[in-house]
Amino acid sequence: MSKVVLITGGSSGIGKSVGEYLTQKGFTVYGTSRNPDNYKNSKFPILALDVKDITTITSTVKLVIEKEGCLDVLINNAGAGITGPIEEIPEAEIKANFDTNFFGPINVIKAVLPQMRKQQSGLIVNVTSIAGYMGLPYRGIYSASKGALELLTEAFRMELKNFNINMTNVAPGDFATNIAAGRYHAPLLNDSPYKKTYGKTLELMNEHVDSGSNPNLMAEAIFKIINTKNPKVHYKVGEFMQKFSIVLKRILPDKVYEKLLMNHYKL
């Protein structure tokens, strides 16, 4: 029997690539979107789900289980970008970002766990970010939300061991997706003390996304994880230097690493 997979944020970008790849490999795939009617030509079903709305989470998970009789893999992929000087980002936008990137995945996990516990099997893949391993200038909120999900996974894994449910993180680097279009940008204010440095950093971030890797690399990585008996805690997928930046953070003195980041972002 093919495994049943649920992908949040499966209508575009990494989620779409993963869904199409797993469908080709014979998996039964369901993606989600806040507006599924916009994706009627999808190669796999797109169901209505907003990770900030518990009612939609509960109903969609229930729908998949009733239709398929099981749920083998959850891929927590839905996420939102956010940029800006932390001082100037409205509190409401900070909370909204954590609702999507942190609290949303928690609520989807809670919705699928009773079924996976009943099955005595299951895999949960949390899509985080290499940015979650370091506090990046003008991406501090995004780094914090993804870093929080990384740490949550470490704790959750241990709590789920007795139920034969695996959980892992996959941290992508920069990929050529439309994430920048949906990202909250704090406006470049003419009277802001951050105008010059934030402006340069914003240009650099957008260049990285535009020249990013093919999201099929994430699809291949997640396919391998699904077929791994005992997945690792953390996986990183991206350009060599992006992954190596995590190694450097681990071995370099904090101030040296900080200086490297500041030089990279021309601060």
Image: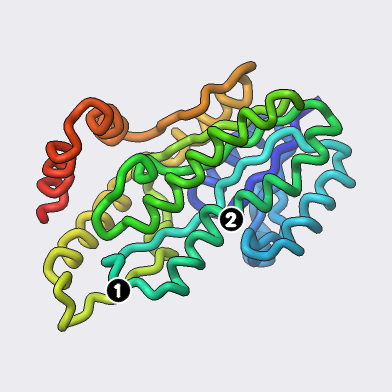
How many dots with numbers? 2
- Residue 121: name its quadrant: top right
C-alpha gap between disc 2 and disc 1: 23 Å
Amino acid type, residue under disc 2 in the picture: Phe
Q: Secondary structure at mark 1?
A: helix
Residue holding disc 1: 88
Name the residue at 14% across, 49% down: 262
Q: Secondary structure at mark 2?
A: helix
The location of residue 243, given as percent across then percent down, is: 31, 31
Name the residue at 25% across, 33% down: 249
Label placed on residue 103: 2
- Residue 147: name its quadrant: top left
Identity of the residue furthest to the top in this view: 229
Q: Are marks 2 and 1 in contact (CB under 8 Å)?
A: no
Name the residue at 35% across, 45% down: 131
The location of residue 120, given as percent across then percent down, is: 81, 26
Amino acid type, residue under disc 1 in the picture: Glu
The location of residue 229, given as percent across then percent down, is: 64, 16
Pointer 2 or 1: first along the chain: 1
Neighbour tally class for label 1: few under 14, some 14-19, many 20 plus, Cα within 10 Å: few
Please state if 116 lies on the left or on the right of 247 as rendered.
right
